[in-house]
Image (cartoon, rainbow, N blue to C red):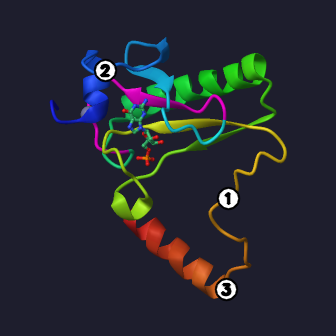
Amino acid sequence: MSDCLFCRIVAGDIPATRIAETERAIAFMDIFPATPGHALVIPRAHADDALCATDEDLAACMQLASRVGRAALDGLGATGVTFQTVARPDGGQTVFHLHIHVIPRVAGDGFSAPWEPVAGDPAAIEDHAARLRGAL
Ligand code: 5GP
Ligand code: ZN
């Protein structure tokens, strides 16, 4: 898609600091890093998000994200990694080409989960599970 920012990065029309490439996916640095070393993994083929990508591209992206995560441990001294992907505006997505964030983590880095864990109502959890099973 010519109007897609990340397709333009795949094509080389927009510069990006690439770190790894496979037949189906590429990894490059995020220009607004959440932590030092924050990278993005995307499929070469356009897919809006993880809800509509092919199984092959989802697998290829997660495999490359895992490699980049290991490199963050080995090369940057990270002691943890947060992998994140979001879908659609209400999911928090701002660039509408599937991407997996690979965010190197260390203790006390200030990066925090976006929710406070509060125990759910067991009946509601069962109800949501039943509705998800029905939709799967
Ligand atoms: P989202 O908010 O959709 O999960 O993530 C989009 C990510 O793309 C953000 O982390 C943002 O910093 C990154 N980003 C936006 N524009 C560019 C760009 O032109 N180049 C690179 N390398 N990253 C970008
Ligand atoms: Zn695209």
For residue 121, the mark is: 3
Q: Quadrant of the N terminus?
A: top left
Q: Tell me residue 33's x, y (percent).
A: 57, 37
- SS for callout 1: loop
Query: First in sequence: mark 1 or mark 3?
Result: 1
Is any part of residue 45 visible from this angle? no
Residue range in magenta is 36-49
Q: Quadrant of the C terminus?
A: bottom left
Tell whether label 2 touches label 3 (CB within 8 Å). no
- SS for callout 3: loop
**Residue where numbered disc 2 is placed:** 10
The amino acid marked with disc number 1 is: Ala
Q: Tell me residue 3's x, y (percent).
A: 17, 35
Placement of 57 over or under 114, stated as above or below: above
Q: Residue at x 80, y 39 (%)?
A: 106
Residue reaching furthest right? Answer: 107
Queried on whether the Cβ of the residue with tag 3 lies below 8 angstroms from ligand 1, the answer reads no
Queried on whether the Cβ of the residue with tag 1 lies below 8 angstroms from ligand 1, the answer reads no
Magenta stretch contains residue 37? yes
Q: Tell me residue 90's x, y (percent).
A: 38, 65
For residue 113, the mark is: 1
